[in-house]
Image (cartoon, helix red, strand yellow):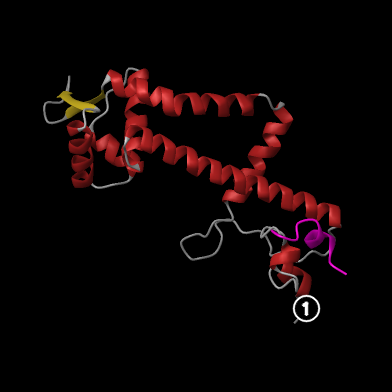
Amino acid sequence: MTPAHLESSRDDPSMMDPRVLDPAQRIVSRNGLTEKDIDETVALLEALRRWRETEEAASEAARRYMNLGDNDMRALRFVITAQEHGSIVTPSLIADHLGISTASTTKLLDRLGKAGHVRRLPHPSDRRSVAIEVVEETRDAARESVGRLYGRRFDTAARLSSAERAVVTRFLRELAATAPGPTGGSQNAPANRAVTATSTPD
């Protein structure tokens, strides 16, 4: 008899489902979990996958709309935000924000300047530096492509109750902590369920 989790999606079983991905439970232990628990967990992971795909598609669409690369878009957002608050942005601040070298930042600003997105202005208090400003047309385009999307996302999060936001925030932070750290292990790894379930005393 075909298991229910395969029967309901025979043509495209979820690769997020440990019953499909890891039937022998070598990676993920399902001890103590009901079928309902597993189904709900898989549905959550599938929703995260769809969000990730949507986020990647939206970012790519914004880059195409403005004909810019990822670091270019990040730099523009950084400068636009600073301008909204009346702050002065220098090339060194952009380099720090992006985590790139001074030389790479110069090339990035040359590229953005040539495309008409930014201009270099004399720094009001430091003659050794310059102030970077995003032109109004680019600010308007960014507001149209990225700003409206951010607004819809903020509205979605704001519609949650305070308790719901706390749960989602805690979950996402714990999920982020499972990413590999510098040594290859997770940054804040919880005990592995499969290992815990199969460990025996020495």
Label 1: few (<14), some or many (≥20) within 10 Å?
few
* Residue extent of the magenta highlight: 1-12
Residue 38 in the image: x percent, y percent? 79, 55
From what the image shows, is residue 173 above or below residue 12?
above
187 left or right of 201? left
Q: Residue furthest left?
A: 127
| Residue 156, percent from left and from top | 63, 27
Tag 1, which secondary structure? loop
- The quarter holding residue 15 reads bottom right
Residue 28 seen in the current view: no
Residue located beneath label 1 in the image: 200
* Quadrant housing residue 143: top left
- Quadrant of the rendering where the N terminus is positioned: bottom right
In this image, 128 relative to 84: left or right? Answer: left
Q: Is residue 193 left or right of residue 77?
A: right
Q: Residue 36, position in %: x, y?
A: 85, 52
The question of residue 30 being in magenta is answered with no
Residue nearest the observer in this picture, 84 or 69? 69
